[in-house]
Image: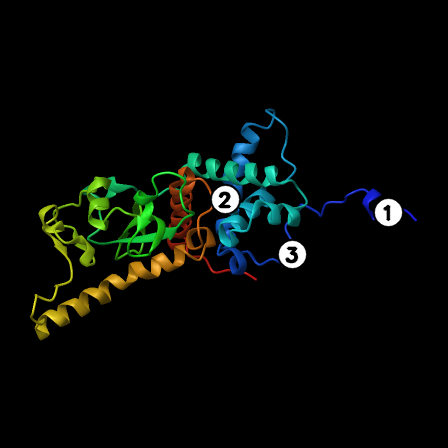
Amino acid sequence: MQSKLSEPYAPRSHSIPQRRSIQASLWSKRQTFKHIVNALSEQTHRRSKVGRPSSLSDEAQVLVTLEYWREYRTYFHISTDWGVSEATICRTVHRVEDVLIKSGKFSLPGKKRLFKGFGRPEVVVMDVTEMPIERPKRKQKQFYSGKQKQHTLKCQVILDLISGEIICTFFGKGRRHDFALFKASGIHFHPETISLQDSGYQGIARYHANSFIPRKKPKDGKLSALEKDYNRELSRERVGIEHINRRLKIFKILQQRYRNRRRRFGLRCNLIAALYNFELMNPVAEVA
């Protein structure tokens, strides 16, 4: 009897599985998926005669990348599903990320939007969220977060409160304080822009007078009823950015412990934030 090991390996089809719902499983609408595929196809046609063609179609490459961001499984497990090598999955993810960044179609407005007179936001909310990482081999103390009690990377997010659009981000090591991260980012708000922050930004009034932070309880004292109402109203206005952080962390790559090299962390955060902005600015009803 012929051994099963001698039978030729037949990889699965590289077409998109029909059972997979893009919006449900990968948090991406069909319109967003098509837009990403178009950006990748333009680059593919531009370099069609250069190098070896990919074994995956453009749609499959985009789906692999979204699957990697959303589920954050290892390259081995994803390559097993698609019937290709781990190196192919790694190259595919990196290529799609680089193409999307260079295309300019999935990019954040940037910090210049905060100071320009035309199109600048009237009210912004600023917050910092942390993502756990593997213990670094060197300079571990710089990444250790006393608040999270683990090694982390910090991501500063600035949100337009009225439109809900993410304007810009900035990244730092887990040990750096939120206010120190703000000063290192070089962010400048327009004098008429209202900025809302949490209590981690004590002293921001020296950099932006039109900013609001919670009132702290004095030593051996209590907050007045008016101050408590102020803090409650400020928290009610700021809660929107917490919802944005949750939306971003639907992608497991930003929620689970980050296993990759840190040099592509900011790129992936910006791409996922740009995907959120794209779906926010292009609300189209899904057709079954």
Q: Which of the two discs, 2 and 1, sits closer to the camera?
A: 1
- 116 on left or right of 38: left
Nearest to the observer: residue 242 or residue 116 = 242
- Residue position for label 3: 18
Residue extending farthest right: 1
Residue extending farthest top: 50
Marks 1 and 3: in contact by CB < 8 Å?
A: no
CA distance separating discs 2 and 1: 44 Å
Q: In the rendered view of the protein, which quadrant contains the C terminus? A: bottom right
Nearest to the observer: residue 183 or residue 195 = 183
Q: Quadrant of residue 8?
A: top right
- Indicate the position of residue 98 as horizontal and vertical percent values: 46, 36
Q: Identify the amino acid type marked 1.
A: Ser
- Residue position for label 1: 3
CA distance separating discs 3 and 2: 19 Å
Query: Mark 3 or mark 1: which comes first in sequence?
Result: 1
- Residue position for label 2: 36
- 47 on left or right of 159: right
Marks 1 and 2: in contact by CB < 8 Å?
A: no
Q: Which of the two discs, 3 and 1, sits closer to the camera?
A: 1
Query: Mark 3 or mark 2: which comes first in sequence?
Result: 3
| Residue 148 in the image: above or below residue 35 | below
Q: Identify the amino acid type marked 3.
A: Gln
Asked if one can make out residue 78 in the rendered structure from this viewpoint, the answer is yes
Query: Mark 2 or mark 1: which comes first in sequence?
Result: 1
CA distance separating discs 3 and 1: 33 Å
Disc 3, SS: loop
